[in-house]
Image (cartoon, rainbow, N blue to C red):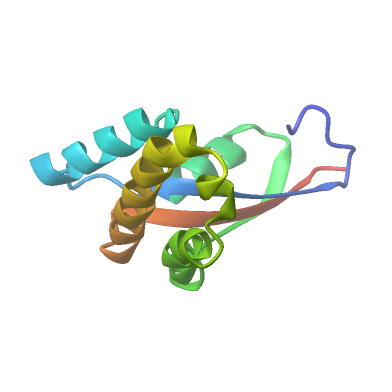
Amino acid sequence: MARVLKPGGTLVFATWCQRETPPDFTPQERKTLDFLYGEWTHPYFISIEEYTRIMEGTGVLEQVESDDWAKETIPSWRHSIWVGVWDPWIVVSKPWAWWKTLRDGVTLERMHRAFSCGLMRYGMLKAKKKA
């Protein structure tokens, strides 16, 4: 992304992140991450701090800033489940989607819990390309 950003341009992105290690993940944390990777076919998550190190290590980005917005985004996980409960027409009209919808509801709840306990974080990152 930095390669195609114009000089002086600002890069801003948000992404799901895991907590920083060390300490190493507990077996239960590893199990949760493996479930999330497999259920939604995610690439491996990295920490906000690792994103910051990568951005600073490019040599072309400066004024790198990062923040964790997990607290602000946690309510959206359960809200996503309730949207389907309050307006189930898409599921009702497509019975073959029931199993996937149920699995997504379980995954949304597990993601909510991973954010709530600090295993997952919502990274907001910003940097400016050197002029």
The one nearer the camera, 62 or 34, is 34
Q: Is residue 65 left or right of residue 4?
A: left
Q: Residue at x 59, y 41 (%)?
A: 56
Q: Is residue 53 left or right of residue 107?
A: right
Circle count: 0
Q: Residue at x 41, y 65 (%)?
A: 78
Whole-percent x and y of residue 96?
A: 46, 32
Q: Is residue 66 left or right of residue 95?
A: right
Whole-percent x and y of residue 11?
A: 75, 47
The one nearer the camera, 45 or 55, is 45
The one nearer the camera, 42 or 85, is 85
Q: Is residue 114 left or right of residue 49?
A: left
Q: Note whether 105 is above or below 75 in the view shown.
A: above
Question: Can residue 100 be spotted in the picture?
Answer: yes
Position of the N terminus, as image quadrant, is top right
Whole-percent x and y of residue 110?
A: 29, 52
Q: To which quarter of the image does residue 114 belong?
A: bottom left
The one nearer the camera, 21 or 80, is 80
Position of the C terminus, as image quadrant, is top right
Q: To which quarter of the image does residue 87 belong?
A: bottom right
Q: Note whether 76 is above or below 90 in the view shown.
A: below
Whole-percent x and y of residue 72?
A: 51, 72
| Furthest residue in direction left, as rendered | 27
Question: Can residue 45 be spotted in the picture?
Answer: no
Q: Note whether 1 is above or below 21 in the view shown.
A: above
Q: To which quarter of the image does residue 130 belong?
A: top right
Q: Residue at x 60, y 40 (%)?
A: 55
